[in-house]
Image (cartoon, rainbow, N blue to C red):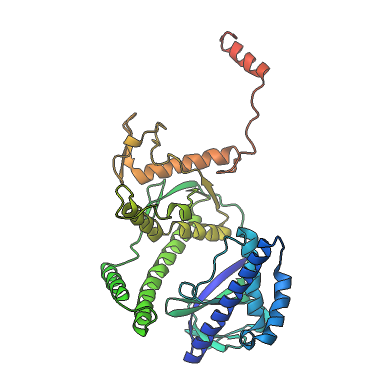
Amino acid sequence: MLSGRRYRVEFTPEQAAFAEHIGGICRSVWNTALEQRRTYRRRGAFIGYAEQCKQLADAKRDFDWLAEAPSHVLQQTLKDLDQAVKTHGAWKVRWRSHRKWSPSFRFPDAKQIAVERIGRRWGRVKLSKLGWVRFRWSRPLGGVVRSATITRDGGRWFVSFLIEDGQGAPQTHSGPVVGIDRGVVVAATTSDADFHNRPFVTDGETQRHRRLHQQLARTRKGSNRRKRVAAKLGTLLQRVRSRRADFNAQTAATLTSRYGTIVLEDLKTKSMTTSAKGTVEQPGSRVTQKSGLNKAILDKGWYGLELALNNAARYTGTEVIKVLAAYTSQTCSACRAVDAASRESQARFACTSCGHAEHSDVNAAKNIKAAGLAVSGRGDLAVGRSVKRQPPRTATRQHAALAARGIPIL
């Protein structure tokens, strides 16, 4: 199977500057090619990857700076754009902003990539026009390198190798079924009453984050001081993202090794974290409350946990399915009664019908598990339409069933 390995890169100052330059060239190629596709669409025409590659080769004769980047890196940029347009459409693909986009480019030709280990903690990789690049050997490669991607996260550079690890698809996992409820207080709660959570930001980092934002607001746009403050802020946020990714990976490894089927709610995280309409000054706009909820959802990494589960499930044979999220937090897992008043608080659920009481997240996880069992039992497509439902009864069968129960047919 194909897998990824990510390592921290130690560029020389010249290599770091050249990597920034390559990233800027790839960004320009992406934006120009995207604008070209949109222009063609406005005229009712179409241009694809092959034609844009030919035009890129012609453009190198007129613009020497295009030839400074490896040719196969620029071609891979056009290929990534082509795939993005096919998936989302030309109008939904985003521009790569100079301020917001972090440099990232891929070397797709494995024949031009050489990886060596030069010590217990260090290795090096040879990349086109960058030469030999040193990186921290934090884990074995474990396979044959297919491609390499250079990215910048905060103030650090990383190299990600796509490898073929030689492992085949495992057999189906024979473990039990578990439901997982993702929350804003506890990141993940299972139907077996296991709570998986970890603080990603310390109190000191929260204060430092606030001070850096205050310093950033007092700087002038484009100044060197603003760049230094933004770099410090990026380093702090990169540390938080690394902790969140590590938590998601460890949680996913634990759950997929223990359970054969994992049931999740079908949560549209991107739609759930959009800002509320209106302004803070408008009465009843609830912009501040919605902003706090968005930050809490993004801090827990709901979508990142889902991706980590799907990735880890490839090696254990665990099945990850999603079910509708409606009323899972308002339904009693004991008597199936639905009442919003049963959710007394964030942590306590007390059914108004049968009196069943337990932790609200555990109750929701049990409802998610029950929905997953119902889906698996009839071969349903979870959030989609069932393909194995029993056919509806004909009028003759309905009349026979009523007559067997002694119910007169009107």
Residue 70 point in image, percent of width and height: 63, 84
- Residue 109, placed above or below residue 377: below
Residue 23 point in image, percent of width and height: 54, 79
The residue closer to the viewer here, 277 or 156, is: 277
**Residue, x 61% and y 76% (percent of image)?**
29
Residue 169, visible in the rendered structure:
no
- Viewed as shown, does residue 275 lie left or right of 143? left
**Residue, x 36% and y 82% (percent of image)?**
228
The residue closer to the viewer here, 37 or 81, is: 37
Residue 106 point in image, percent of width and height: 60, 76
- Residue 36, placed above or below residue 391: below
- Residue 283, placed above or below residue 152: above
Judged from this view, the residue extending furthest toward the front is 43
Residue 11 point in image, percent of width and height: 49, 87
Which quadrant, please, contains the C terminus?
top right
Residue 31, visible in the rendered structure:
yes
**Residue, x 60% and y 52% (percent of image)?**
172
Q: Quadrant of residue 208?
A: bottom left
Q: Quadrant of residue 83?
A: bottom right
